[in-house]
Amino acid sequence: MADKVSTIFINGTEYPFKEGQTVIQVCHENGIDVPHYCYHPGLSIAGNCRICMVEVEGNPQPQISCKMQCAPPPWVSEPLKIQTESEVAEEGRSGVMEMLLVNHPLDCPICDQAGECHLQDYSYEHGGGKASTSTAKTKLPKNVPFGEKIVYDAERCIKCTLCVRFCQEVTETNELDLGGRGDEEIVIMTSKGEFETPYAMNIIDICPVGALTSKDFRFKSRLWFMDFAPSIDTSSAKGVNITTGGREGEFLRIEPRYNPGVNQWWMSDEGRLGYKFVNSPTRVKAPLVRGENGELAEALWHNAIDAAGTALRASPGDVLVDGGCTLEEMALAQELASAMGAKAKFAAATGEGDDWLITEEKGANAKGGEMLGLARAKRASAAAVLMIERDEHVNASMREKAGAVVVFALDMEQVPDSAQVVFPMPSWAEREGLLVNIDGLVQAMERNQGIGPGNLTPPVELLEELIGEFDDAYEWRGREGVIESIRAMKAFEGVPFPGDTATAEVGA
Amino acid sequence: MTATVKPVRRRKATFIDRLYLPAIFKGLSITFKRMFKPKVTMQYPEETWTVGERYRGVPVLVKDDEGREKCVACSLCEYVCPPKAIYIVGQELEEGNKVERGPAVFDINMLRCIYCGLCEEACPEEAIFMSKQYTVSGATREELVFNKDKLYELGGVRSKGVKKWKDK
């Protein structure tokens, strides 16, 4: 009996593999690009698109690498020898591309997927650029609504069944299935036109072509004009890793970002569509100071800081921050409160949750606030400083009853009548900082330059200025310095921070 | 190294030179002589050039012979435009329309346009053309940002070429 084979030759190089791995997995692990449509690392393997074909030495026909085990049959003692870029493999792929494009409309100028479409990419890389048939393309239903948020275009669909498998395996709600046959096979909704699952929009991301598009993002912008930045979803406390996308100040979309420890490839629809308040036309865009006539008027930053210092010295009090504020902001709020001889609190809403990515806790950094030792404000109470990002955390009654003189607000609607000085609060997509998710994992979010009015001084700097108004000996530390002092706290002893270890690093 | 300066001596103006009258009469005599000779220059703007077939004038948008906008707001011209003169916002067209997508806003800033013709070259729908219009004038900067209506007015109808959505 021969020894168990534990390696595989890919393009002449020997790679080890784990039991049960398929060829495409080993290729991707080692940075070898193998095209794929129907393969997704988070779903079962269907093997129906056939684009991932590779040449296996000793086999005259190319084989699909997504379903092919790395381990050879038990009676073979030699490792498999795979060629991913040989003539046989390329010929196979070019044939598959031609077949896929027989009925695929060439409406890339209209299609929203253009720019992130696998069919476009692989047609360019592996396609032959010509068709052997001249039959008319099949006419199928276009612009079919799949629930409230998704639009399905059957002509563009390549029937890879990724969306069907997502609904069967990940959410286990079975809303989608294939119907019809041959040319006229399309994806149909088995439920009555509505998705049960609150995770339905993930099928838009996994769709390799433009068959499933988001009603929300439809035709808003071309991908190549947008700015993207890695961030964290702040609609719940799970700390779902996301990529924010915006163009010329407008927040346009959110996509999930892979993080094996938190959300894998997925995110909830609520988080995905929870950015609308950032595009509010009544955003606070400059610091405001209440003048002698009782009206709030735009002021220069340093004048506003002086006015805030004066107002706070006249009536010091507690600092109430939004449960979505970053760890650095909360730590500085605490310092500001102690400089005024008061306490810092945070307010965070709670709501419905499930046992996956939607938590009952809605404050994205509520855990961080607790770890810093901030008390949780349950009902309206007096405060001198308010930091408001989302309406629901520091809610209307808290805002009005606090009697705060200095307010960090995102929207003019959030400013209470008592405010003497208003500072603009950048939304989470416009700030960089650390958030602690409900499981205690510290994750970093980055600023997206394409979102928001721009030119807003980060709240971290403003808070440091305000502390300086009370403490003449205060030394400016910057965000890095604040993080250093947070790490020195007892509650954060041994807690990995982003950049420390592989586990705390934001996903690829 | 310093530059070498070579002084040139000027001729001193004589009394007749300083009268200026001979020079004025000489000039006027040329003017009057030319008045009665045939004209050799083009009398612009009464007369205008007939430009060549491949002349690149103001970029314009065209409609097809059914009066539909050809542009689908794919933004390729916006992407390719070297001076970033084009600005497009797409929109979803009402249901029943054979094309899903069209431009909500299509602005060309004629103060920026360099008439390179790359927009025409990039357009997959044959919706934007370099016209033969070469006079662009306006009293304000805003006036010279041509909007969608103005561009269609200049472009008119073009029935030839790509008409993808005809039998759909």
Image (cartoon, helix red, strand yellow):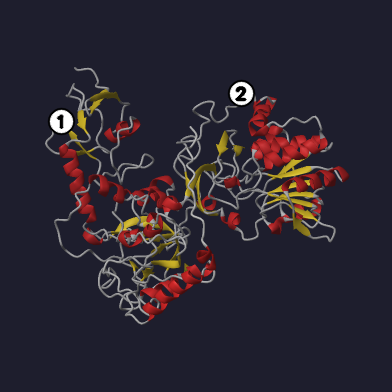
Q: What x and y, as percent, mark residue A500?
A: 54, 26
The extreme front residue here reads B15
Q: Indicate which disc, 2 or 1, sits on the residue closer to the N terminus.
A: 1
Q: Image check: B147 left or right of A212? A: right
Find residue A62 and report its image quarter. top left
Determine the secondary structure under disc 1. loop
Above/below status of A2 relative to A207? above
Q: What x and y, as percent, mark residue A352?
A: 60, 50
**The C terminus of chain A - image quarter:** top left
Q: What x and y, as percent, mark residue B102?
A: 40, 67
- Residue shown at the point (73%, 50%) measured from the top left: A300
Q: Chain of mark 2?
A: A
Q: Image check: A131 left or right of A228? A: left
Q: Which mark is drawn over residue A219?
A: none
Above/below status of A463 relative to B65? above
Q: What's the residue type where badge 1 is placed?
A: Glu
Which residue position holds label 2? Answer: A494
